[in-house]
Structure formats: structure tokens, C-alpha cells
Image (cartoon, rainbow, N blue to C red):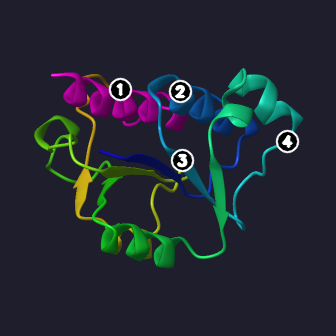
Amino acid sequence: ALSFLVLEGIQDPHNLGACLRTANAVGVDAVILPKDRSVAINATVSKVASGGAENTPVITVSNIARTLRKLQEAGVWLVGTAADVEISLYDVDLSVSTAIIMGSEGKGLRQNTREHCDYLVKLPMHGVVESLNVSVATGVCLYEVLRQRQV
């Protein structure tokens, strides 16, 4: 099964670097980034990624929605993250070809992106904080994909 990470509108180079580092650690097949409204891979991103930026395929696309449709047509399930939904990450079968889609810091996924997802999932939150840093949430999601595939 293939695994992709789609990062929509990440603004902080440290967050992007951390996401690329984790994507490499779990063996993601490719990371997909939008050309616009997102930080580009730069020296800070590369340093934080600790080799992940250079050793993980990164695809920059001009249209995320079109890319998501192409992934779906190729049999990839689209799993977006959102705080305002009922389905938990842990309730979805991630053993199939999957793209984990993470939204921007603060705003989350754009509505158009949400509408393309096969599943919108949340990470269970039991404390007073309402959300996790995007790079931490990405790590949780990617390692759940890895865990399900090792069973």
C-alpha cells in the first residue's frame, strides 16, 4: 500500500521540516505541497528535517484539489484531519493506500480540500488544549498508518 502526506498551507519552516523528518522516518512514498500559500523548502526546513527533505520525494503542485482527485482515481483513500468531526483517526482503516492530509496552522484544511476527503478524522483530545502543533499531529497520524500496516 502506498502512503502520501499532503500538507496544505504550512507557514512555519520548522513545522514543515519536522513533518518531512517524520515522513521520511515512517517511509512515506511522497509528500505533496502546494506551490502557493505554503512555505517553500529552504535552508531552515532542510536543517530541521535532518535529511528528510533530501531523501523523501517532495512534489509541489499548483492545484491541491486536482491532485487529490488524481490520487482518488488511482485508488488512494484521502484522510483529512479536522477538530470538528466525530470519527477518530483510530477508527479508520489506514492499511490501504492512503493520503494523510494536514491543514495549515490555525486554519486547518480549506473547505474545498475537506470536501475531497473520503474521511475527516480527529485526534482524541482529553486535556484543556484544543489542538496539537501540526508537526506533532502529523507524527501521530503517520505512525498510526505505520502501526496498522505492521499488524
* Callout 4 amino acid: Asn
Give the position of the C terminus as an image quadrant: top left
Distance CA(mark 1)–CA(mark 4): 25 Å
For image coordinates 22% across by 32% down, the residue present is 124
Distance CA(mark 1)–CA(mark 3): 15 Å
- The answer to whether the residues at label 4 and label 3 have Cβ atoms under 8 Å apart is no
Q: Earlier in the sequence, mark 1 or mark 2?
A: 2
Which structural element holds mark 2?
Answer: helix
From the image, tell me which residue sits under label 3: 30
Q: Earlier in the sequence, mark 3 or mark 2?
A: 2
From the image, tell me which residue sits under label 1: 143
From the image, tell me which residue sits under label 2: 22
Give the crowd class for mark 2: few <14, some 14-19, many >=20 residues within 10 Å: many
Q: Main secondary structure of the magenta part?
A: helix
- The answer to whether the residues at label 2 and label 4 have Cβ atoms under 8 Å apart is no
Distance CA(mark 4)–CA(mark 3): 18 Å
* Callout 3 amino acid: Ala
- Residue range in magenta is 129-151
Q: Which mark is residue 42?
A: 4
Give the crowd class for mark 1: few <14, some 14-19, many >=20 residues within 10 Å: some
- The answer to whether the residues at label 1 and label 2 have Cβ atoms under 8 Å apart is yes
Q: Is residue 139 magenta?
A: yes
Percent across and percent down for residue 36 are 72, 68
Is residue 100 in sight in this rendering?
yes
* Callout 2 amino acid: Thr
For image coordinates 47% across by 68% down, the residue present is 110
Q: Earlier in the sequence, mark 4 or mark 3?
A: 3
Percent across and percent down for residue 84 are 26, 53
